[in-house]
Image (cartoon, rainbow, N blue to C red):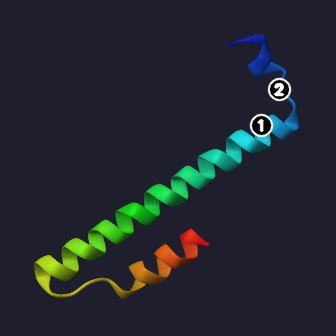
């Protein structure tokens, strides 16, 4: 660890946590939409909850 990362101010820590949370939401949204597209076009039925989940994660 560098000295900067050990003594980082709370604002920097908050920014890292929020960036990680946003990346997680974006990843979950992408996976949900991909799975829904595969199910809809591959098997003829999708998951209705994935559309709501992607809207919730986008906002």
Which residue is disc 2 drawn over? Answer: 8
Quarter of the image where the C terminus is located: bottom right
* Mark 1 vs mark 2, CA separation in Å: 7 Å
The picture places residue 3, in percent across and down from the top left corner, at: 78, 12
Along the horizontal axis of the image, is 17 left or right of 45? right
37 is higher (above) or lower (below) than 10: below
Under circle 1, the secondary element is helix
The picture places residue 33, in percent across and down from the top left corner, at: 35, 70
Quarter of the image where the N terminus is located: top right
Q: Do the residues under discs 1 and 2 have CB atoms within 8 angstroms?
A: yes
How busy is the neighbourhood of tag 1: few (under 14 within 10 Å), some, or many (20 plus)?
few
Q: Residue at x 85, y 40 (%)?
A: 11
42 is higher (above) or lower (below) than 4: below
Under circle 2, the secondary element is loop
Along the horizontal axis of the image, is 56 left or right of 46? right
Which residue is disc 1 drawn over? Answer: 13
Along the horizontal axis of the image, is 12 left or right of 57? right
Q: Residue at x 21, y 82 (%)?
A: 40
């Amino acid at each position: 660890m560098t000295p900067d990362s050990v003594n980082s101010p709370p604002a920097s820590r908050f920014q890292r946590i929020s960036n990680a949370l946003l990346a997680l939401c974006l990843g979950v949204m992408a996976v949900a939409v991909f799975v829904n597209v595969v199910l809809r076009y591959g098997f003829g039925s999708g998951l209705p909850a994935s559309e709501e989940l992607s809207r919730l994660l986008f906002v």
